[in-house]
Image (spheres, helix red, strand yellow):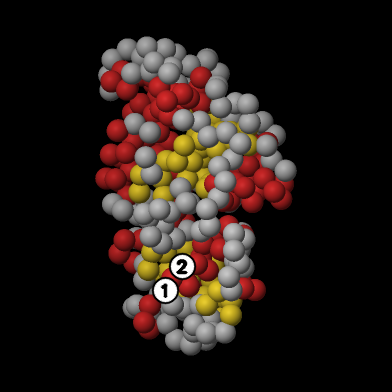
Amino acid sequence: MPTTRRPRTAVALGAAAALALSLSACGGGEAELSAADEPLRVGASPVPHAEILRFVQDELAEDAGLDLEVVEFTDYVQPNVALEDGSLDANYFQTIPYLEEQERTAGYDFAALEPVHVEPLGIYSQSLGSIDDVPSGATVAIPNDPTNAARALRLLEAEGLVVLADTGEDAPTALDVQEGGRDLDITEVEAAQVPRSLQDVDIAVVNGNYAIDADLSPADDALALEAAEGNPNANLVVVRTGDEDDERIQLLEQLLHSDETRTFIEEQYEGAVIPAF
C-alpha cells in the first residue's frame, strides 16, 4: 500500500493513560475512575473484532468502570452509516485506507484512533495446492470495495500472478492489470461473500476476518498471505470527530491496548490476527 495520511485526529495512547486508569485495577482491584453511566455502543465485524471486544467486555470493562455494548455487523458499509447517524458511539472493523476512501465518497467526518490488530489478506483455493499451481487464465475472486480490491491486487502482484501499472499513490484497480503474469480472469465480489465463491473459482483473495468466519485458517490454509511487517492496513476504533476525548472512548482504547488483550489476540488466533501495538 502507498503511504497514507493519518486522519484528522489520531488519539495517542498517552491520552488514555492520562485518565490515570490503572491496568492493574482491570485485573481485579478497584478502578480509579468510572466512565459515564451511559453505555458505550461499539459496532464491529463478528470475527475477530466483536470477539476481541467481548473479551474486553467480559474480562476488563467492569473493573475499569466501562459499560460496553457490542453490536455486530456483517458488512463493511452499515457500521459507518450507524456511526454517522448516532446509532453507535464508535466502530471497530476498518483500516485507515478504507476510512479515507469512505470519507471521500460519503463525506464522513470521523477520527481514527490507535491501531489494534492486523488481519493479513490471504489467497485461498479449494482445488490448488500452491501458488505455483495457479494456471494461466485462472479465475479469481477479490473483494469489490476499492481499498480491499487494491490490497488483493497487490498481493496477487507480490505472488507473481499479475502485473500492475504504476499508479503512484492511487490505489490500483482491476483496470490497472497489464499483460504479463498469468492472465487471470478477475471477478469482484462483496467482501463478506468472497469465501462462498471459492467453489466457483480457482483462487480467491479473502479478508482475514471473513476467512476465520468461514472456518479457514490463514496460517494453515492460505496459499499466500500479506506480509504483516510494515502493513498499513491495521484495524482500529473509529469515532465521530470531536468524540475522541469521551471518557468511555479513552477507557476502551486503554483496555484494547492492554497486555491482557494482546495475549488474548495472540493465543486466540495463532497468527491469523496479529496485535499492532
Left or right: 23 as drawn, with respect to 40: left
Q: Is residue 217 above or below residue 71?
A: below
The amino acid type found where label 1 is placed reads Glu
Residue 159 shows which numbered tag? 1
Q: Position of residue 11 (x, y in %)?
A: 51, 31
Q: Amino acid at mark 2?
A: Leu
Residue at image position (34%, 31%) is 258
Q: Position of residue 188 (x, y in %)?
A: 60, 69
Seen from the viewer's position, the closer of residues 105 and 62 is 105
User: Do the CB atoms of the residues marked 2 and 1 lie less than 8 Å apart?
Assistant: yes
Quarter holding the C terminus is: top left
The quarter holding residue 177 reads bottom right
Is residue 194 visible in the rendered image? The answer is: no
Q: Look at 48% across and 51% down and name the residue there.
A: 233
Position of 46 relative to 208 (above/below): above
Residue 122 lies, in percent from the top left, at 42, 64
Label 2's element? helix
Q: Whole-Å distance between the Cαs marked 2 and 1?
A: 6 Å
Q: Secondary structure at mark 1?
A: loop
Graded by Cα atoms within 10 Å as few (under 14), some (14 to 19) or many (20 or more), the crowding at tag 1 reads some
Label 2 sits on residue: 155
